[in-house]
Amino acid sequence: MEGRLDVNTLKIRGGKPLIGELEVPGSKNSALAILSSVILCEGEVMLEHVPNVSDTLTKLELLHTFGVRTQWVEGSLLIDAGELRSAEPDPDAVGRIRTGFYLLGPLLARLGHVRLPAPGGCKIGARPVDFHVKGLRLLGAEIELENGYYIARADRLVGAEIYLDFPSAGATQHLMSTATLAEGITTIQNAAIEPEVVSLAEFLNRMGARIEGAGTGTITVIGVERLEPCQFRIPADRLQAGTFLLAGAITQGDVTVHGIMPDHQTPVVNKLREAGAIVHEGPDWVRVSSVGRLDAIQVKTMPYPGFPTDMQQPMAAVLALADGTSLIDETIYESRIGHISELNRMGARIQLQGRASVITGVERLKGAVVEASDLRAGAALCLAGLAAHGETTVRNVHFIDRGYENLEAILTGLGADVVRLDANGKRVEVTQAGPGIPR
Ligand code: EPU
């Protein structure tokens, strides 16, 4: 979204405990991976529970460039990639989201040649695509990078043994989906085991792919000739769920998130328990409440099932108010740090030491005008604003809209005092369709 004019702000009057129950929308990262792979099928695919966030809208814009037709039908998304065509997508659209690049393999499988601008996404680190390119080459693609464009060709894709130097979620998803139409058997070793990899494999298998081992470190894909139409429901967003659970903790409230897999919340929930929050779990819900200040803890981000990097910044907001000195060690992205200066403007005491944030807990945060620098930094600032004394204005809300659907409506439903304002300071009413996609 860099460079896009966005003038909305969120105004949060903090200090109210959030109390209540909610269901979260579909997973952004699951949906984005599925929306890359959907073009492997020449027939119609129906996706339910697609999240109403701006990253989805950008992804659909890209798909339209390649001739894909989409239509909202009673809240579900009907996708027809039957008449896929070569195209030069707008570099700005590809530059806005990381997963634009995940179209490369599936487009190659369908069209035999592709020219795609280098990818974008939130600016949280270098975010190279070398594993993707290496894996696609092993599958038989010729790929060159020329003047900021990846140019790829493949007469046919063939199964291969692929080893990932790091269990990258995106590379696992991209290579696994591309391999579904390759001739023969592909194995991906040191594969990511993120829930979004598993949901993508379930989706591809629903279309007739033959994928085994998704959710383990070794994935086997037996190539098939074609994929068939299907209907699929995107699972709930574990990162939105985690954010609302943290909102319960930071405001000393009591929040229950329904319709989720509690297993996916294990790292967040365990760290909250360690810090003194009260956590209850049921078959498809998690409830977090807290009374008084939480204790300082140490957190280290790791690939799944470790503590998610995406929850690192929101957790920093929570620990900014904890009793004692906490440490968050970010091992995945080298510069997922945009929240620190802004939280400090609100009275937090966070110092960066290498990749670690040393957080000296304070008794109170105070409202301030702050700027989101990326999606999860924005979420962290909202959490801080909910707990702070006085009014917080969060600017650059478009970053938050990338991955949180109707955030202010959900927070208001939990008792928060949050409004969205336009450039003239006029209140923007929350609609059912939210800020993203007209349905
Ligand atoms: N990496 C490489 N080379 C590659 C690919 C990745 O060095 O070719 C490195 C990355 O630079 C990073 C690490 O591997 O240091 C992990 O990256 P990964 O590929 O797993 O991340 P991603 O697929 O680009 C997805 C999510 C991110 C989330 C990460 C980690 C999507 C669209 N994005 O990114 O989500 O942080 O996995 O779980 O699925 C977010 O939602 O806010 C977000 C940034």
Image (cartoon, rainbow, N blue to C red):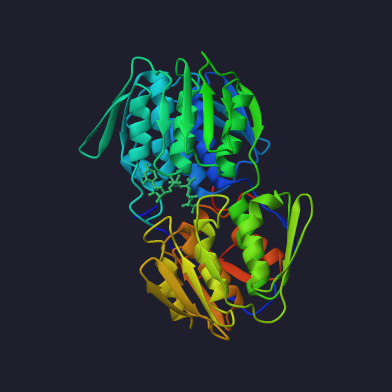
Residue sitting farthest toward the bottom: 363
Indicate whether 419 appears above or below 64. Answer: below
Compared to 195, does 351 lie above or below? below
Displayed quadrant of residue 183: top left
Q: Please report the residue visible at 57 percent of the width from the left and 77 percent of the height from the top.
A: 296
Q: Looking at the picture, how far across and down is residue 110, in whole percent?
A: 42, 19
Give residue 358's position: percent from left, percent from top: 45, 75
Is 303 on the left or on the right of 208, as rendered?
Answer: left
Instruction: Tell me what residue is drawn at x 48 percent, y 68 percent.
Output: 328
Q: Residue at x 50, y 30 (%)?
A: 37
Towards the viewer: 146 or 192: 192
Q: Can residue 372 be seen in this view?
A: yes
Q: Is residue 45 left or right of residue 285?
A: left
Relative side of 305 to 397, left or right:
right
Residue 112, above or below 244? above
Is residue 107 or residue 46 the one in the foreground?
A: 107
Res 428 → quadrant: bottom right
